Amino acid sequence: MRVLVCHRLDEQVMQAIEEFPGIEVTVWQQAGPMPRQAFLEQLARAEVALTMLTEQVDEEALSHAPHLRLVANVAVGFDNFDLPALTRHGVMATNTPGVLTEATADIAFGLMLVAVRGMWAASQAMRRGEWRGWSPTAFLGRDLAGLRLGIIGYGRIGEAVARRALAVGMLVAAVKPRHRAVEPLPGVEWWERERLVRESDVISLHVPATAETYHLCDDAFFAQMKPGAWLINTARGSVVDTAALLRALDSGRLAGAGLDVFEEEPLPADHPLFHYPQVVMTPHIGSATVETRRRMAARAWDNVVDFLSGRPPRDLLNPSVWQGQPDSL
Ligand code: DGY
């Protein structure tokens, strides 16, 4: 059984992978994402691949991979997978749910705090020598306590952000999930999306990247938002129309934003977003802690071990492949 690991992972997990009996492991050792050509060449030999969200597993990749049986994404998001194509090709796909919830919620909450208190702009001004001494009117942000947070995407991460917001005295509303029965945390109110967009002081996005959520935040969305509100995005870049976001910042409709994900990653150094001090940005680090990345690698590997042991992988995204039935995704 040939196993491809597309990026060197946490060393404890690597040791478990490299010592697993009866498999031949190929690890991409270079820093940075695997170049497409190298990925296609390696995938052509592999039966199992541990992929990062930077590897696109699409029709082209699958047509190069006649032996492939399982792709285990080291991420909870799987928009780098063409799931219907994987299912058509009879290849199982897995992700890593539940292990990066708290780390990602921390980054969402952190971006919100830094944006709403204007900490990034104040810190930059200080570095430029513009701090003239304590002033009752300079560098004013807003109190988080009492502001209304609106959550779009009330899954595990959305709920963990709500928990943090409630703890500091924010009012919290969320759009009720349509496809799952879920109770809101005490203190969280279900609001229709339109009301939530109109009345929230801060909107935090926690939806997956799908055709339905593509450019969910467009000109019309920003025009509906409460003037002077903030937008936080730790979900996926494609959920926000960047050009519309820039227009909303220029018009002053948006007070600021906190962004961890971008339509174009890595964000080019000359991107216009860098000109807005009220926009706080981090380079897609929602899950980037030692503990969380270890759990993600371990969870992806658990899925592979399930498969190697003849069990259905625990986080199987296309169960019909295991059942031997092409499904109708
Ligand atoms: C995920 O798991 O989808 C995250 O974006 C990776 O940090």
Image (tube, rainbow, N blue to C red):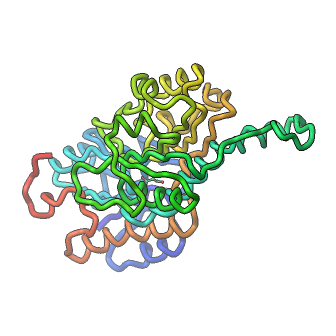
Lateral position of residue 16 relative to residue 58, left or right: right
**Residue 297 screen position, x and y as percent:** 44, 66
- Above or below, 32 against 11 in this view is above
Which residue is more in the foreground, 123 or 77?
123
Split into 4 quadrants, where in the image is the N terminus?
bottom left
Quadrant in the picture for residue 253: top right
Which residue is more in the foreground, 326 or 260?
260
Q: Residue at x 52, y 40 (%)?
A: 201
Which residue is more in the foreground, 277 or 329?
277
- Above or below, 203 against 251 in this view is below
Quadrant in the picture for residue 124: top right
Judge whether residue 86 can be spotted in this image.
Answer: yes
Q: Residue at x 59, y 24 (%)?
A: 252
Q: Find the residue positioned furthest to the left.
A: 325
Q: Residue at x 7, y 56 (%)?
A: 325
**Residue 241 screen position, x and y as percent:** 44, 28
Lateral position of residue 266 relative to residue 85, left or right: right
- Above or below, 224 against 17 in this view is above
**Residue 179 screen position, x and y as percent:** 21, 51
